[in-house]
Image: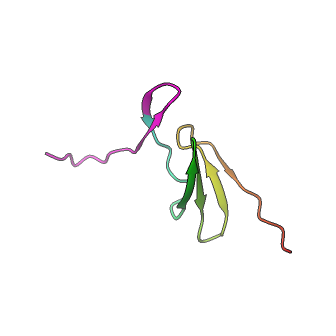
Amino acid sequence: MLSDRPHLPLVFNNAESSWNPCRLAPGPTAVLVASSGSLVLYHAPDTGALVVANPLTGATRALPAPQPP
């Protein structure tokens, strides 16, 4: 039987061979674009910003906007 309680997303920590709670996207409208290793790239459609996040630690960093040509 399924539980009515919400389930938190989990991520696997390869270094410790354990499952850990996932820190979610940096904003409610952020769209997952790509991932590599332990990093995830999000795009904020409302602002056009790109944010790199580590879902295991919750650390995020906004990428600088490209310079116009």
Q: Nearer the viewer, residue 55 or 28?
A: 55
Quarter containing the C terminus: bottom right
Of all residues, the one furthest to the top in this rendering is 16
Q: What is the x, y in percent for residue 11? A: 45, 39
Which colour scheme appears in the figure? rainbow
Vertical relation: 43 (above or below) 18 = below
Q: Is residue 63 left or right of residue 14?
A: right
Mark count: 0
Quarter containing the N terminus: top left
- Among the 4 quarters of the image, the one containing residue 20: top left
Of all residues, the one furthest to the bottom in this rendering is 69
Q: What is the x, y in percent for residue 54? A: 58, 43
The answer to if 2 sits in the magenta stretch is yes
Of all residues, the one furthest to the right in this rendering is 69
Of all residues, the one furthest to the front in this rendering is 36
- Among the 4 quarters of the image, the one containing residue 30: bottom right
Q: Residue at x 58, y 58 (%)?
A: 42
Q: Is residue 33 left or right of residue 51?
A: left
Vertical relation: 58 (above or below) 15 = below
Q: Residue at x 64, y 56 (%)?
A: 51
Q: Residue at x 45, y 26 (%)?
A: 17
Q: What is the x, y in percent for residue 65? A: 77, 64
Q: Residue at x 66, y 60 (%)?
A: 50
Vertical relation: 19 (above or below) 60 = above
The answer to if 57 sits in the magenta stretch is no
Q: Nearer the viewer, residue 20 or 6?
A: 20
- Which stretch is magenta? 1-19
Q: What is the x, y in percent for residue 31? A: 53, 63
Dominant SS type (magenta): loop
